[in-house]
Amino acid sequence: MRKFILGASVALAAAAGPAVAQGLPTQAPAPVVPVSDGAPLFTGSAAAPAVLPSGPAAPVVPIGGESYPIDGGYGGIVGDAAPPYRFYTEGSFLLWFLDSTTVASPLVTTGPSLGILGQPGTAVISSAQKADYGAAPGFRVAAGGWLGESRLGFEMSGFYIGRTNDTHTLGGNSATILARPFVDTISRRENVRVVAAPGAFSGGVVVDHSAQIWGVDGTPFWRVINGDSVVVDVITGFKFLQYSEALNIFDASSILSGGASAFNGFGVSAPAQIAVHDRFGATNSFYGGTIGARMSSGRGGLFWDLTGKVALGAMHQMVTVDGTTTLVSGGPFVTTAVAPGGFLASGAYTGTRSDTRFAVLPEGDFKLGYQFTSWMNAFVGYSVLYVSSVARPGDQVNRNLAVTQLPTSPTFNTISARPAALTDIIDDGLWVHGFNFGVTLTY
């Protein structure tokens, strides 16, 4: 190679000789930077000699014969080199699990003694006591970018898990004893409202739990580490999250020839039907600030992200309790009447109450993905979120009732003495976790 360069230099000198003799302008030859065999030559003028590039370059990952800057899965800038893109968008399908809930108060009983608690043979039907929501589908979207040539970026993101239900249906015939237990605050004894009993009532109970969660984050982030293979961002910002949950209890009884009931204090006999609906709803709205960090790395076509952050703020809790009792009378003319108040949701226990409490929301997210092109990657991840303070409907159930405040009691009296309504909201913790499947686009 050196012999070839030397020969080429001699030939150029010979060709330049006549030109000089003819008076053409001359110029000092460009200095040659010696390099190893096979490397390109860098040349320049005598006044401005060539300078080799300096400073750290963006690490690249070879993919399909090409090289793309590692973006950590969210369009970040690696090192000090100018980024090939400024913005990114992300969409994910979520398959998350909401924490199960248990109702402490017994909702439905059975047994030879009409299901009265404490009597021989009485058993609580456990399937009505717990809600297991299983895997709930949802989605997450995000968009962000870098502000100018700085290391400061901003991201807006939001997720949504639609309403998911866990429903239990009990009874539905006259051969089973079903009852809804309560403590009569007047007699101070266990009592029941009979829904189904052979020869007296044919009926059933439906217990339905439902939940929904969504949230929005606005997060400025600052790149603090620009490693060749690892980058780290500090995250701050604002978080809003809302978790809603409801407990609905329905029961319906057809009065048979051997049974009798009441509606608004008046006796009712066969072939009438009575339906009762209790609803306990809870809405939890969180407002707070967020701080955390995100670390990303990649090798080959693969990359991974690890994010951890915590939000501190106020949780506004609102609990609503309401119910209705419906009478469908038989005979030649069918009539329907509706009275306010159900069974557990009746009397002084109906209405809305609210409270605001301090809450902590730590969360973590891990992603493993592959960079398919310079502008697109796909990933799978796992997320965990804990909410320290939420009101859940099952915790708000109170079975201490005065029989005189039940619309299905023959002694029902709207102006009778009633126990004071509960004023304190009972709160609990909530876990949400699950899988993410998504795509990131950069431009």
Image (tube, helix red, strand yellow):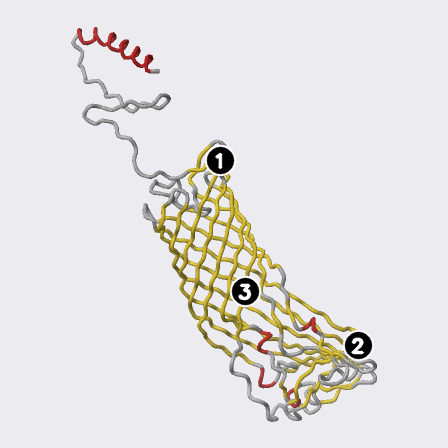
Mark 3–mark 2 distance (CA, rounded to whole Å)? 37 Å
Q: Secondary structure at mark 3?
A: strand
The reply to whether the C-beta atoms of the residues labelled 3 and 1 are less than 8 Å apart is no
Query: Mark 2: which amino acid?
Result: Thr
Q: Residue at x 80, y 85 (%)?
A: 259
The residue nearer to you, when weighing 341 against 356, is 356
Mark 1–mark 2 distance (CA, rounded to whole Å)? 67 Å
Residue 328 point in image, percent of width and height: 73, 79
Where 141 falls versus 25 (above or below)? below
Which of pointers 1 and 2 lies earlier in the amino acid sequence? 1
Q: Which residue is mark 3?
A: 431
Residues packed near mark 1 inside 10 Å, few (<14), some (14 to 19) or many (20 plus): some
How many numbered markers are drawn? Answer: 3
Q: Residue at x 49, y 39 (%)?
A: 301
Residue 288 point in image, percent of width and height: 42, 66
Query: Mark 3: which amino acid?
Result: Trp
Residues packed near mark 2 inside 10 Å, few (<14), some (14 to 19) or many (20 plus): many
In the rendered view, does 241 fall on the left or right side of 14?
right
- On residue 63, which mark appears? 1
Residue 16 appears anywhere in the view: yes
Residue 205 point in image, percent of width and height: 72, 74
- On residue 38, which mark appears? none
Residue 330 appears anywhere in the view: no
Q: Secondary structure at mark 1?
A: strand
Q: Which residue is mark 2?
A: 176
The quarter holding residue 246 reads bottom right
Which of pointers 3 and 1 lies earlier in the amino acid sequence? 1
